Image (cartoon, rainbow, N blue to C red):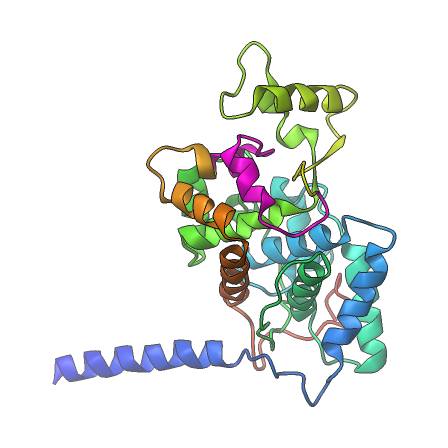
Amino acid sequence: MASFFKVAFFLFVGLMVRASKAQLCPTFYDDSCPDVSNIVRGVVQQALETDDRAGARLIRLHFHDCFVDGCDGSVLLVNQTGVVSELGAPGNANITGFNIVNDIKAALEEACPGVVSCADILAIASVEAVSLAGGPCWEVQLGRRDSRTANLQGAIDGLPSPFENVTQLKHKFGRVGLDSTDLVALSGAHTFGRSRCRFFDNRLNVSNPDNTLDATYAQQLRRACSGSRDTFVNLDPTTPDDFDNNYYTNLQSNFGLLGSDQVLSSTPGEDTVQIVDIFAGNQQQFFDSFGQSMINMGNIRPLTGNQGEIRSNCRRLN
């Protein structure tokens, strides 16, 4: 009898987990806000006209949101009564794109007020940003709600760092249910965007050079960063504004800008090396895996049903 109840209990838990994930679906707004994707795409496209980094800003917000207590829009919150913002975490230093999110939210509130969550805005904006840069589309799962809290310590502890090795990166991805393929695929978002010199200039020490960084490229980076540690450098030196698989061919040639990128290809014995090689040799394989990994990441602990709220201002609680 005891074993029967134990089996029944685990079946019940499994059903509850599947039901929670099932509450996210691509057709969630078909009736309540049918033009949501077109509205988001229009605002992102407009932002890209004056800001080449707009797409990278948006996808970074989505990543940093999902890695702290799930995809709940908490990264967007500023300090306010009852909320200590996650933006004080080192991993969120200089994170930007809030103006674009505000513009998207304003456009959606005009079309369908009180319907689309800020967490879903980040998910939709990410696929539109990637698509507009020549990358893949994927079927975005929708129906997330916005948190009424933030988790500064969670952001301090949980966000991946550009200074970490493969073991540390795998641990942080594993904590949120993502595997090595997800790690390598999602890191491919660094195929567009920029980084400040301060996040990689530790690799440029002349007296102790990083042997996983191409020497000629290192010299170019020293010149680029000579004026300020806050100088921006392209993450992908070959096609900086296009979403393609050149990120991986760069890693194979020791042209990874961030240490946390290059270790994926340069750490002997790690399964990430083979995954990098696969994506470098087959862009469609990268695109397919990236889309699936974005779905996997987007499924991390969403608030659904009556949990949380739909914020009218993404930066503040209702």
- The x, y position of residue 286, in whole percent, is 52, 55
In the rendered image, the vertical position of residue 89 relative to residue 226, given as above or below: below
> Where is the C terminus found, in terms of image quarters?
bottom right
Q: Which residue occupies the extreme front position in the image?
A: 281
Taking the magenta stretch, the answer to whether it contains residue 257 is yes
Q: Is residue 165 visible?
A: no
Q: Which residue occupies the extreme top position in the image?
A: 207
- The x, y position of residue 260, in whole percent, is 52, 37
Left-right relation of 31 to 299: right
In the rendered image, the vertical position of residue 134 relative to residue 110, given as above or below: above
Taking the magenta stretch, the answer to whether it contains residue 199 is no
In the rendered image, the vertical position of residue 138 relative to residue 237, given as above or below: below
Q: Which of 89 and 14 is in front in this view?
A: 14
- Residue at image point 49% right, 59% down: 289
- Residue at image point 70% right, 45% down: 193
Q: Is residue 121 visible?
A: yes
Residue 202 lies in what quarter of the image? top right
> Where is the N terminus found, in terms of image quarters?
bottom left
Residue 237 lies in what quarter of the image? top right
- Residue at image point 86% right, 55% down: 49
Query: Which residues fall within the magenta stretch?
Result: 240-263
Left-right relation of 101 to 273: right
